[in-house]
Image (spheres, coloured by chain):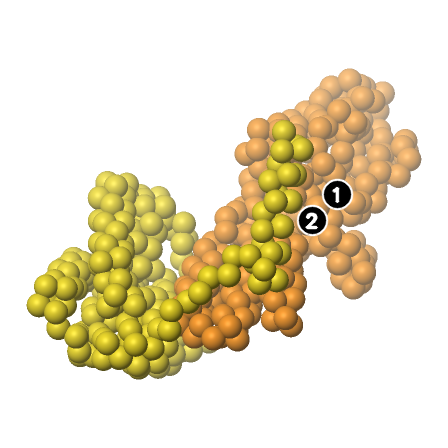
Amino acid sequence: MILSALAFGLALFALTQRRLLWGVLGVGAHSLTLAGLYLALSAPDVALTEAAVGFGLVTLIYLLALRRTGKLVVAACPLYPLLYQEGERVAGLEWEILERFARWCHRDVEILWVSRQEIPRLLQTGEAHVGAGGFLPAPEDKALFSRPIVSTKLVCLKLNDGPLGAIAGEPGQELASITYEDAAELAHALVRGEIGGAVVDLLRQREWQLHRFISDVSDTTISEEKWFTFAVAPDEEELWKSLEEFLDMLEKTGVLEELRRRYLG
Amino acid sequence: MKGMAGLVVFGLAGLLGLGIAGIWPRPEFPNPDPIARDWDVENVVAAIVLGVRLWDTLFEVLVYALAMVGVRFFLGKMQWRGELPPLAETPLLRRSADLLFCPILVFALYVAVSGHIGPGGGFPAGIILGSGLLLLALAKGVERLSAELYEPRLEGLEYAAVSATLLLGAVVLIVGVRSSSAFVAGNLLIGLEVAIGAWVVLHRFVLARGEV
């Protein structure tokens, strides 16, 4: 009786686990309990076979498959403290989160470096699972957004009275008359004087200042607080849920706060 | 439609409840001990599987071999050509798999050989050996293990085991030999066949998909 209840409980446990490894272990323990049940019902031959097949073979095959459950394709545009390349290596606050998340759900991260306006398209077609990097959600983006990761504001950097430029796809493009494919093009246009100013967010402004692209500009904050988030492909609701759960865990354990402090000061 | 489904489920649950309560059906089982004595073994299950119902077992063995041949035949042409990322080396797993493989092998042999005396037999023994091979594959990577196990020879061994099982079955069925040595030989052969079959099927799938 106790064994039956345990078997039922373990089956429920295996079904409800989000982490695949725990699910597999649950299935293995369930098989072992079933073997014990057969033994109690005086069928040792069946118990032996159940233990060998259910606990041994099936668990091992699942574990073997778990070693490569697949990839987590991240479409990202580089933004200095969040997600950027440092030589061969990828680094940044969001990278640390993504890396931990991938390890948590047994996937390998693969990053596609794309421009900002490519990210929603790749998420729509399913070519990427997660959008990250300098990803400020714009109202027209159709994706599942995670909780806010880093707060920022839109600022208008003005050199002279020329037209304003922005990065295509970002929320700032509504305020600008010319859009550019990525941040580097926008910066070059600004330096060459093709545009009189740029609408970007605080982190981009800081990146430019660090690289000394711009100096002597007047900046005005022009928006309410905005948030960098992860965007998850619309068909990947399960992935979104587990990402939320994972971020929740990071937040509760204080890891997220520590990462923010380390990368953003 | 939903009502019908509900009725069916309710009916099945009712039947199950009657069975558990012991009201209906009440099958009367014959005493199995004479069967075991008749076949000169102590384990009744072995006497049934390899004695009274030997035809069933022989055909099961054939079906298993046929499944292996089918997998080999249909997946033979589908070879994965993509590049495989290298597996991370895990020394702990590697060492423990090396240490565990020999005990597993011995235990599988024991289960096969003692199948006519106590619980065990060819099928669990084969599966235990197959699990041992899988453990090695998990530690070393399938490609490396398959380079060490020469598959054509393994398959030859498998076909030999199937033929020997059939031959043994014929001897037992036609000549009427009833001794425990026939049981030991049958269990060993079936164990060998099951283990090799499990490995070959897994290896074929990995070769064709390249995911592991």
Tell me which amino acid carries mark 1. Ser
The subunit carrying tag 1 is A
Q: Nearer the viewer, residue A72 or B19?
A: B19
Q: Disc 1, disc 2: CB below 8 Å?
A: yes
- In the displayed structure, would residue A258 be above or below residue B209? below
Q: Nearer the viewer, residue B121 or A12?
A: B121
Which corner quadrant of the image does residue B212 belong to? bottom left
Chain A on-screen colour? orange
> Which residue in the structure is indicated by mark 1?
A146
| Residues behind callouts 1 and 2 on a single chain | yes
Display colour for chain B:
yellow
Residue wearing tag 2: A243
Q: In the image, what residue occupies the spot 24% across and 71% down?
A: B187
Q: Is residue B47 left or right of residue A208?
A: left
Residue shown at 77%/54% (left/top)? A248
B165 shown above or below B204: below
Q: Position of residue A254 (x, y in %)?
A: 80, 62
